[in-house]
Image (cartoon, grey):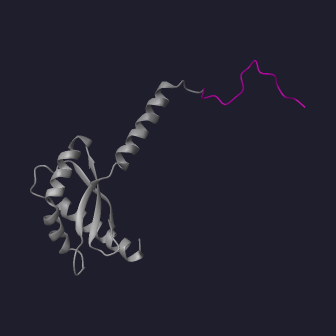
């Protein structure tokens, strides 16, 4: 990725997030929808928009709504970005946040199941002393 495509992707991410935050009249798009990243092709014709949806129960329906509204989102984002032509948008579900939440949950469960170490750092009373 070139510096230019990274900058365009960042500007697109902000614009698409703003369009979604202002609201779309699609009842399928529900929950907290976050645009995590936008990867733009080198020829700037296509952009892959990674989306995180919370709660996870709304993922499928929300992704369906975003894919259906991609032309509308593209037109509204074009008003916010200074580009001669906006790339075609394809929305994909970003599983990173979901995977991170699962790892954190597993760590919390493991900590709850393991015995707690003693809080007192002093040696036990029956331990021999080291006096040189």
Q: Residue, x 17% and y 62% (percent of image)?
A: 70
Residue found at x 55% / y 26% = 116
Indicate the quadrant where residue 49 lies.
Answer: bottom left
| Quarter of the picture holding the C terminus | top right
Q: Is residue 22 left or right of residue 104?
A: left
Residue 39 lies within the magenta run: no
Return the residue found at the far bottom: 84
Q: Is residue 73 above or below residue 116?
A: below
Q: Main secondary structure of the magenta part?
A: loop
**Can residue 122 be found in the magenta stretch?**
yes
Q: What residue span does the magenta drawing correspond to?
A: 118-132
Residue, x 38% and y 71% (percent of image)? 6
Which one is nearer the viewer's eye here, 130 or 79? 79
Quadrant hosting residue 105: top left
Percent across and percent down for residue 68 are 14, 57
Q: Is residue 123 left or right of residue 116?
A: right
Viewer-proximal residue, 84 or 56? 84
Q: Say left or right for 114 vs 36.
A: right
**Residue visible at 18% across and 57% down?**
67
- Which residue is farthest top? 126
Left or right of residue 120, residue 88 in this image: left
| Number of marks present in the image shown | 0
Quarter of the rendering occupied by the N terminus: bottom left
- Residue 9, image x, y percentages: 32, 69
Instruction: Name the quadrant containing residue 124.
Output: top right
Percent coordinates x, y for residue 79 in the rendering: 17, 75
């Amino acid at each position: 990725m070139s510096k230019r495509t990274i900058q365009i992707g960042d500007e697109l991410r902000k614009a698409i997030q703003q369009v979604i935050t202002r609201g779309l009249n699609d009842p399928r798009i529900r929950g907290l929808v976050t645009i995590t990243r936008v990867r733009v092709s080198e020829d700037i014709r296509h952009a892959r928009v990674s989306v995180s949806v919370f709660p996870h129960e709304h993922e499928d329906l929300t992704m369906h709504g975003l894919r259906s509204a991609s032309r509308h989102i593209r037109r509204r984002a074009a008003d916010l970005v200074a580009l001669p032509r906006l790339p075609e948008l394809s929305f994909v579900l970003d599983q990173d946040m979901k995977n991170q939440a699962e790892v954190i949950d597993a760590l919390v469960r493991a900590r709850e199941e393991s015995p707690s170490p003693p809080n007192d750092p002093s040696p036990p009373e029956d331990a021999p002393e080291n006096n040189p």
